[in-house]
Amino acid sequence: MKSFTRTIPLMGTNISLYIEGTDAEELAEEAVNMLIRYEQVFSANSEHSQLAMLKKEAASHPLRVDKELYDLIKIGKEHSLNEDSFLNISIGPLIKLWRIGFREAHVPEDTEIKAMLELLNPEHIQLDDELQTVHLFKKGMEIDLGAIAKGYFADQVMAFFKKNGAASAMVDMGGNVLVHGDSPTGSSHWKVGIQNPFLPRGNAAALVSIREQSVVTSGIYERVLEKEGSQYHHIFNSRTGYPIESNIASLTIIADRSLDCDIYTTELFGLDIVSIIHKVNNMKDIEAAVITTDGNLAYTDNLRGRIHSISSYSNEIVDAIYI
């Protein structure tokens, strides 16, 4: 049985695909085509994507979109409206205002931020299931699916691999890791490294063992703006318009679906460590690990025996290290 690995620069990151099975190379190429099409529909940075067309037209009239985009917007809106949720798919204008991670990143005036807050209400996204249309109630609103889109893409690609007989596979969307079958080392479980938020990329703070699951981490360390002695990260509180203030350096979620991982790494990120662990302990089929800004690691009860801290000099084999 053949294995094939393909890495491509897409969606602002490097996407890695590993497949073992018949026609592995052909499956990888078809998966690449899927991902290119997703970027054309979902991209927030392209003027020609369907998501961009919503910004241009959906405030004046309802706009019909592809079913996949509609479904993801609907899921994102539902979770954006959950009590105490820090996920907000209507956060687009705020992201564009700060531009953290881009050359033109800056700290906006407080008056600019406050003026922007009225555009960040997910209740102002009107959806019509029958017509599959999206209507934005206020001009200037903009949907941003960056927090959840990669998880959705990973799930779709993995479903395609499984449907076409892949014996084992890994989809790494530049941080969204989803695995199927045995690892390339021959083990029934994959060892995935949780990035150390205080060291350069590729240094793991802990290893977690997974099978038929996804692992996703959100952290304050990846995109940072430094201005006049202050640091501003890219994870925002849409209620204040400023980066979330907490002692959480990174939040890792493990679940069967990569989309669920994406949702909860964002939805829960603004909570304190005790609240995160307590909340996830009471959720079905979801696991969490949290690293605080002072270097402590905490994790949910269902990860006991499957996660352990490692030193930066560990020689353990890791199937994927991710952000």
Image: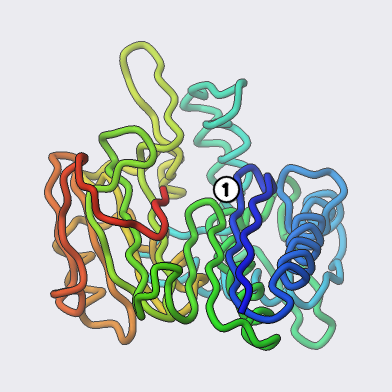
Residue at left 53%, top 59%? 172
Q: Which residue is nearer to you in this view: 299 or 132? A: 299
User: Is residue 288 shown left or right of residue 99?
Assistant: left
Give the residue at mark 1: 118
Residue 30 percent location from the top left of the image: 79, 69
Look at the image and tell me whether residue 48 can be seen.
yes
Quarter of the image for residue 246 reads: top left
Residue 143 percent location from the top left of the image: 66, 55
Residue 70 percent location from the top left of the image: 73, 73
Residue at left 78%, top 51%? 55
In which quadrant is the N terminus drawn? bottom right
Amino acid at circle 1:
Glu
Residue at left 52%, top 71%? 259
Q: Which residue is nearer to you in this view: 80 or 70? A: 70
User: Is residue 69 shown left or right of residue 107?
Assistant: right
Residue 34 percent location from the top left of the image: 77, 66
Look at the image and tell me whether residue 59 can be seen.
no
Residue at left 65%, top 75%? 156
Give the residue furthest to the top. 228
